[in-house]
Amino acid sequence: MLNQKLFKIEKEDSYNKHSRLIKEYKEAHPLAKIISLGIGDVSFPVPVPIAEAMKKACGDLTSMDTFRGYGAYFGIESLRKTIARKDYEGLGIGPEEIYVGDGTKTDCTAILELFDEKVKVLVGNPTYPVYRNGAYAMGREVCECSCDEECKMTVPGERYDIIYICSPCNPVGNAYTKEELSRWVEYARDNGSYIVYDNVYKDFAESPGLPKSIYEKEGSKSCCIEMHSFSKNASLSGTRCSYFVLPKEFGDEMISLWRERTINRFNGASYVAQKGAEASYLPEAQEIIKKNIKVYKENGKLLRKTLLEAGFFVTGGIDAPYLWVQTPRKDECWEAFRIFLEKMNIVVVPGSIFGSRGRHHIRISALGSREDCIEACERIRDHYEKSC
Ligand code: PLP
């Protein structure tokens, strides 16, 4: 009776085990001042102009004239228009091509319902585990892509139907250049494949040659679904709001299938969250968002410098708020996690949660507070100076 595919979801290398070990350690050491550089939640609160817009939206719900209930299956019009105008200026994406959701975590798995059950899904190794585990939960076949020395997925010789690309990338912290993405778009076009392009960290990209959208590449609108979230920039990780683009170039049949599916499977994202997301584009909100992202990015650079000086091999920390780190002695990742927790009281994430090729890595998040980041760097320096 049970969905057997759910048994494929990894339990040993999982966030569940990670949380359990941290909880056990905290219970045994109640006085330890633990710093979390682990799970990728943001530490800055919701910017006030966004919270004010959500308060006003709550007010709308109390009046006969402005009450909003069912009906906005694909998102409220004002938000879809704002996204099209602000995020896709000059790229020719209209509001009707934008679908608002309640988080990219949900969206990136839900989109598989558009495609046949027999599709072959390609993910990185390492990868954001939701692509793999979500596809398992939906009973799809999942294959792993090989990666180059910079941990970027290499275009395969064989054909796959759906390819998940995350850029800027969780967990490895780098980003694909326009040229690298172009190769993937050409692969998708040549093979009749589709790319699910997750750019929830696009606001962190700063190196030259990095695109803000996959639609900057000509020809991508017929084969790429771009996903974005308001969790990381607007701190709506607990409020839940996201969007993705299904361009009209996918064709009338596919678009109407998706719309039918959505009307039958989803009653739309929260009105209050959507009004918050819309307010995130206001200049006064943008000012705060940019300031917050600057702090996370400085954290990334500080952590990167500290880890490199301590002899670690580090990828990322510049164009994404994550560092993908190999310990100097190539420790097994759960052992490295234990050393960080017990010797430095720092929480990191074992790399194997993201795939078997993360066995000798840990992932460190730069989304913590500035104070915690400085303190963590001191602890790392102290520990590795002593142990050398
Ligand atoms: N995509 C990636 C690559 C992520 O790292 C995360 C969260 O950490 C998400 C999606 C989830 O986004 P949301 O909060 O919108 O579900």
Image (cartoon, grey):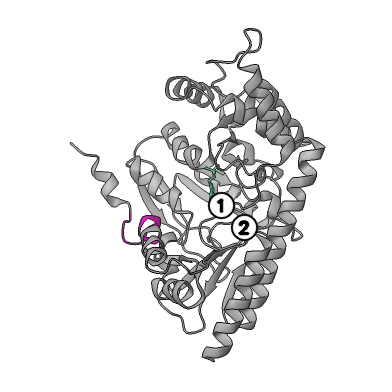
Disc marking residue 3: none
Is the C-beta separation of discs 2 and 1 under 8 Å?
Answer: yes
Q: Nearer the viewer, residue 357 or 331?
A: 331
What percent of the width, then of the height, locates residue 134? 40, 44
Determine if the C-beta at disc 1 is less than 8 A from ligand 1: yes
Does the magenta portion include 190?
no
Q: Residue at 64% x, 67% y: name it.
A: 373
**Would residue 217 appear left or right of 325 to someone viewing this image?**
right
**Residue tagged 1:** 41
Residue 238 shows in the view = yes
Q: Amino acid at mark 2?
A: Leu
Residue 381 vertical position relative to residue 337 in the rendered view, above or below: below
Q: Nearer the viewer, residue 39 or 128?
A: 39
Secondary element at image label 1: loop
Disc marking residue 367: 2
Q: Residue at 72% x, 58% y: name it.
A: 295
Does the magenta portion include 16?
yes
